[in-house]
Amino acid sequence: MIRISFTSVQMSFLFANFIIILLYLVFRNQKLMVKLGIPILSIGLGITVLRMFLPFEFVFLSHNVYLPKIPSYLLDYFLGYHHFGNCFSLWTFAVIIWISGTLYLAARYIINECIFASNLKKNCHKLPEHAKAFLIFQKIQEEFPKTRNISLYTLPQVCTPMIYGLFRPYILLPEKLDLDEEQLYFVLRHEASHYLHHDLFLKLFINILSIVYWWNPCTRLLSEQTNSIIEMRVDRSVAKVPSQKVKYLECLLAVAEKIMVSNSSINSCNVISLCSKSPSILTQRFSMLMDDSKDIFYKIKMTLFMCIGIFLFVLSFWFIFEPDCIYTDNNNIGITPTVENSYFIERTDGKYDFYFYEEYCETVDSLEYYDTNIPIYQREVIL
């Protein structure tokens, strides 16, 4: 049997935020972030998104865990309808703020993307076929046929090469990019690799997670870590031998110098740039690229993290946290509702007023976890 309740939604919510915080803590280890970053991130995001879409309680699997007295009282008060004529709870206000913030950020995200897409349509220029970058990119497309779906443009507003677009990707280059042929190859190969590795979709998932859980500071920090993971993974795939690494780093430095003196900015969350203005991120990329050490336990670590992810996912369905009892408004003494000491009055809005020893305690929207024998009266029959 499958059912949905506040506590099952609560477990989905707690699990998603726990995984976000856990990923952030794991990726504070830079070497782990580079060597296992993308697989761990994919597993973490996968089970988080799946759990968000499965806020259910499986009765045959779930076990109720009753909280101690103080947490039970706080949770009961948080969920109870004690405000504005017993019509609103603190949870109601929290949900209103959460949804309002999510809608605002989602609207701003969509507006910014529409503005950027409109700007791109008006101001971008396709590279002529005789351009040096165009000829080099043709060689890359011959080397990697899947990149033939990518278009090459220049955009006056950009100061660093970047890629944009999920299904019809564009590599956007600055109008004046003074690089030699080998450096241009590295730049174009780098941006094409983002498309080959589906990094744009990964960044989209992170952006959605940041919008939904906007109030969790670890979400924004995880987003920044993800950008670093994506860039370092591509760096290592483009420049593999020492001679390539030296030339590649020179290319990054040349582009970084242009960024530092430029005032232009791109107001889009769905672009992946070759470089950023953060010196710390650039330093990380340099150190990780020059690190030639191999992880002989890679497969063991990957299997371990996958097993941990599956275990945590199942565990989120296994235990459901519940308050141990209900607390009255007049005192903090825990009570257990029974047929003898309590009853419900059904309201016109579908909720129920709970009475204990003839005194009103709270308003609830579900009787799922109460004794089914407790009387339920209609409001009009109570004198």
Image: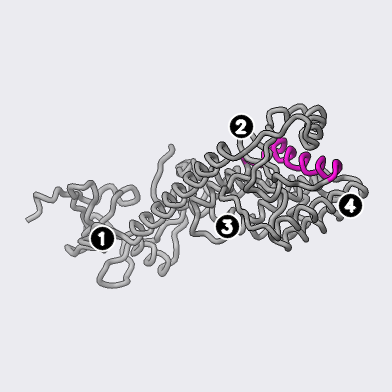
Is 71 situated left or right of 129 in this image? left
Between the residue at mark 3 and the residue at mark 4, the CA separation in whole angstroms equals 32 Å
Prevailing secondary structure class for the magenta stretch in the rendered image: helix
Mark 1 neighbour density, 10 Å: few (under 14) some (14–19) many (20 or more): many
Task: Identify the amino acid type marked 3.
Answer: Arg
Q: Nearer the viewer, residue 168 or 318?
A: 168
Residue placed under numbered mark 2 in the picture: 167
Mark 3 neighbour density, 10 Å: few (under 14) some (14–19) many (20 or more): many
Magenta residues span 180-201
Residue placed under numbered mark 4 in the picture: 246
Between the residue at mark 2 and the residue at mark 3, the CA separation in whole angstroms equals 26 Å
Residue at left 46%, top 51%?
A: 105
Between the residue at mark 3 and the residue at mark 1, the CA separation in whole angstroms equals 38 Å
Picture coordinates of residue 10, whole percent (x, y): 45, 52
Q: Which mark is residue 220?
A: 3
4 or 1: tag closer to the N-terminus: 4
Is 32 situated left or right of 202 in this image? right
Q: Marks 4 and 1: CB-CB under 8 Å?
A: no
Residue at left 84%, top 53%?
A: 250
Task: Identify the amino acid type marked 2.
Answer: Phe
192 up-or-down from 258: above or below: above
Q: Which mark is residue 362?
A: 1
154 up-or-down from 287: above or below: above
Q: Secondary structure at mark 3?
A: helix
Q: Secondary structure at mark 2?
A: loop
Mark 2 vs mark 3: give the one in front.
2
